[in-house]
Image (tube, rainbow, N blue to C red):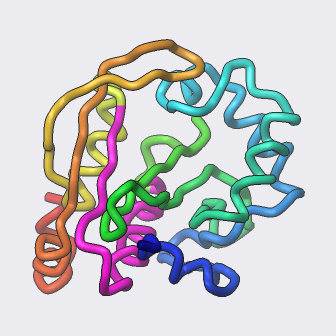
């Protein structure tokens, strides 16, 4: 059975505009910015697939596979500055997607990750067949946990994953069901952000 996310890949991904951001498909000329931001141990240690050090060749390899998925470059709306990545990947269950995101350190603490994650989660649930979006973060990553909570994700449990930069690490797992997302949309996001 084909995964629901395949419907988004039937044509080119369209940019998503939010109040302060433009999420667009990544381009080859993003490689230097990706390498510069991801080559920060504070970023890499929070992620599963990012090695440290992270070189230009790593960014080019990432860009080589990013085009085959639901992956967005997170850019600042006013000036187009590259800030990080946000996207969805399929899970073994065709109706469930997995959310991932990272921003470079200069962009932390300003609500950009929450804004990008909201937009990408909304995109996922526009597909009628998606029933749930999952996400996880390192147990020590309070900022990422807060992003997920603001988006309405609910804690599901703990686990571990292997970070290429930090080895085996403790994680927290979250999920957002379609019915919860629909309720948050009908109430407005204020309830999720309080």
Q: Quadrant of residue 107?
A: top right
Please tell me whether residue 128 is drawn above or below residue 101 in the rendered image: below
| Residue shown at 69% from the left, 82% from the top | 12
Q: With respect to residue 41, does 126 lie above or below?
A: below
Q: Is residue 3 left or right of residue 29?
A: left
Q: In this figure, what is the number of numbered marks? A: 0
Q: Position of residue 83 (x, y in %)?
A: 64, 51
Q: Is residue 183 above or below residue 67?
A: below
Residue at the spot 67% in from the left edge and 86% down from the top edge: 11
Closest to the observer, 142 or 72: 72
Please, is residue 19 above or below residue 145 in the view?
A: below
Work out which quarter of the rendered image holds the N terminus and state it. bottom left
Would residue 30 appear left or right of 131 to someone viewing this image? right
Work out whether residue 102 or residue 161 is closer to the camera in this orientation and state it.
161
Task: Report the span colored magenta.
Answer: 112-137
On whether residue 75 falls in the magenta region, the answer is no
Q: Position of residue 154 (x, y in %)?
A: 14, 51
The outermost residue toward the top is 167
């Amino acid at each position: 059975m084909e995964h629901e996310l395949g419907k988004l890949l039937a044509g080119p991904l369209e940019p998503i505009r939010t109040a302060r951001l433009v999420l667009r498909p990544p381009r080859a000329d993003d490689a230097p910015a990706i390498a510069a931001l991801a080559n920060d141990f504070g970023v890499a240690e929070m992620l599963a697939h990012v090695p440290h050090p992270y070189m230009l060749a790593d960014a080019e390899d990432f860009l080589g596979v990013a085009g085959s998925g639901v992956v967005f470059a997170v850019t600042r709306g006013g000036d187009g500055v590259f800030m990080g990545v946000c996207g969805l990947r399929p899970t073994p269950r065709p109706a469930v997607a997995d959310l991932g995101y990272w921003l470079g350190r200069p962009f932390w603490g300003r609500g950009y990750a929450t804004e990008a994650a909201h937009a990408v989660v909304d995109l996922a649930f526009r597909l009628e067949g998606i029933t749930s979006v999952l996400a996880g973060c390192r147990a020590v990553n309070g900022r990422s946990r807060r992003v997920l909570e603001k988006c309405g994700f609910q804690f599901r449990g703990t686990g571990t994953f292997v970070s290429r930069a930090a080895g085996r690490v403790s994680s927290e797992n979250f999920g957002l069901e379609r019915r919860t997302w629909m309720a948050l949309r009908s109430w407005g996001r204020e309830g999720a952000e309080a």
